[in-house]
Amino acid sequence: MSFVNQAAFNDPRSYQMAMGADLRTSSAIIGLTGQVLIYAQTGGMVNPTRYELQPGAIVLRFGNASRRAEGVAKGSWWLEKPEFDKLFAFAQVWDIAIGMAMRALCLVPPEWSEATLLIRARVTEPLLAWRGLANSVVTPAATGGPMVRMPHQNDVSERRLYQLFVPGLAALPQIMPGLRVEQEYPLEARESVRGFIYTV
């Protein structure tokens, strides 16, 4: 079977990015001769595994409304419909906005996404993805000060959510082939951060 993002998936950097590695050399630890010794780790997945998305599968993604649906769909991080349903139920049980539920379960601080747009897309051709549970997040706060720290809670079943990292979508000339955006849902920016606490 051929996959439209096979080359991007085969690139070793896709696995590193799924693991949460920041591949910018400006954030890496550099050796005396200029070689990268280690990349910064900023979240990502625990033990990503190869996963196939078949045509007809429904996937959802949060992003910034300023990028519009087509721009958000070029991103790599997605949820399958059953995982999104779990996220939605979590939001209802705890009476929080869907954007804030995404932050809690997918471990996405405000520094990474405004979460002002939710898109629903359908897979139109086979795609390869990395699949795994969220890893703990440690990243600089946008306003300076202490680092943002979000420990994973994968040992709590109601907070255990599998995510997908689909490499190569941004390199495709258009969303088709691969994905077709079916719906978009604007989200309120304030609600997507209401209740988010920066701890020291």
Image: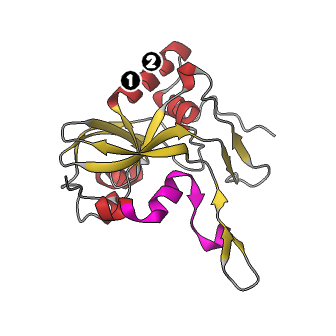
Rendered location of residue 100, percent (x, y): 54, 31
- Residue 139 lies within the magenta run: no
Identify which amino acid the numbered label 1 is placed on: Asp
Provide the residue designation for mark 2: 89
Whether residue 52 sits left or right of residue 116 in the image: it is left
**Residue drawn where x is 56% and y is 66% of the image:** 23
Q: Main secondary structure of the magenta part?
A: helix
The stretch of residues the image draws in magenta is 10-27
Q: Residues within 10 Å of mark 1 (few under 14, many from 20)?
A: few
Q: Which of 76 and 29 lies nearest the eye of the viewer?
A: 29
Outermost residue to the front: 1
Q: Which percent across, then down, holds residue 43? A: 61, 48
Do residues under tags 2 and 1 come within 8 Å of each other at their CB atoms?
yes
Left or right of residue 29, residue 188 in this image = left
Label of residue 58 in the image: none
The foreground one among 157 and 144 is: 157
**Residue 24 highlighted magenta (yes or no):** yes
Q: Residue at x 37, y 59 (%)?
A: 9
Q: 57 or 194, which lies in front?
A: 57
Residue 85, numbered circle = 1
Q: Amino acid at mark 2?
A: Ala
Q: Position of residue 165 (x, y in %)?
A: 42, 48
- On the image, the x and y values in percent for residue 32 come to 76, 83
